[in-house]
Amino acid sequence: MSYCVNCGVELEESEKNCPLCGVEVINPRMPYVEGAPRPYPARLDPINARMNRRFIAVILSIIIAFPAVLTLSINYIYSGEAGWSAYVASSMVLLWFFIVPLFLWQRLSFLRVVIPAVIALAGFLRFMEYLNPGSGWYLKLALPVLCLVAVPFAIIGWLIEKNKLRSYYAASVIMFVMAMITFAVEFLTESYAYGSVKMDWSFYAAIPLGAIAAALLAIARRRSWRDRINRRIHI
Ligand SMILES: [Zn+2]
C-alpha cells in the first residue's frame, strides 16, 4: 500500500499520480503497474450532486414554509383572517427567494440569484403597502430606491463575473456608483418627504466615496503602484 506524500490519500499500484492532488507516486516497494485495475471512479457523478442540491432546496423550503403555514393557520383559526400572520408569511416568501434559488440552479450565476431576489423584494414592499395603504411611499420612494441600487449593482456584478471589470477598476466603479446612489437617494427622500429638494448629507457621504473611487482608478491605471500595493497586502 502506498500513500500520497502530499495529501495522504491511500493509493493503489494502478496509480502513477495521486488521483486526488496529482502528485507523482514514488514507492520503490510497490512500483506502478501499468494496466492494473483502477479502484477509483473515472468521474464524479453529476446526477448525484444535482439530486443533493435539489434535496437541500426541498428541505429549506419546508423549513421556511413551516412558520408561515403555522402562523397563518393560528391567526385564521382565532380571528378568521390573516392579519399579523400576513407579515410573517410574506417575510418567509421573501426569505425563500433569497436562499432557495442558490440551490435550484444547476449553474449559478450572479444575475440568476440577484434578479429573483430583487423582484421578490419589490413584491414584498408592494405587499407591505397593500397591508398599510396611504401616502404612496411604494411608488414614490421604495421602488425607485430599490431600482437605483439594484440595477447598477446587477450590471457591475455581471461585468465582474464576465471578467470585463477587474480588481481596482471594479472597486473604483463600485465606489463611484455608491456616490451617485447617495445623491439620488437624498434627492428622492427629500422630494418625497418635503416636496422640495435641498441636498446636504449626501455630499458628506459622496465626497469621500468619490475620492476613494479616484484613488482606486489612479492605482488601476499605474502598474507600478498596483504591484507595490499587491506585494504589501500579499495578493
Ligand atoms: Zn495526493
Image (cartoon, rainbow, N blue to C red):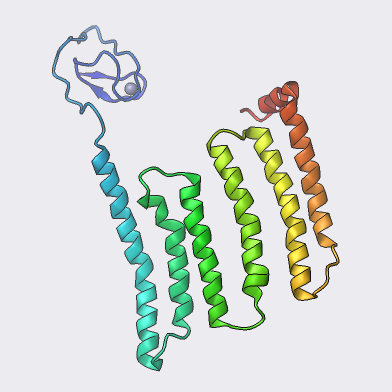
Residue positioned 35% across, 83% down in the render: 73
Q: Quadrant of residue 212?
A: top right
Compared with residue 201, is residue 34 higher up or lower down, i.e. above or below?
above
Residue positioned 46% across, 64% down in the render: 95
Ligand 1 quadrant? top left
Total numbered labels: 0
Percent x, y for residue 157? 57, 44
Quarter of the C terminus within the rendering? top right
Left or right: 153, with 105 as reference point? right
Q: Nearer the viewer, residue 128 or 227?
A: 128
Looking at the image, which residue sits at the far bottom? 79
Compared with residue 64, is residue 23 higher up or lower down, i.e. above or below?
above
Residue positioned 41% across, 89% down in the render: 81
Percent x, y for residue 188? 74, 66
Residue positioned 50% across, 48% down in the render: 111
Q: Nearer the viewer, residue 142 or 82?
A: 142
Looking at the image, which residue sits at the far top? 28
Looking at the image, which residue sits at the far front? 139
Compared with residue 28, is residue 39 higher up or lower down, i.e. above or below?
below
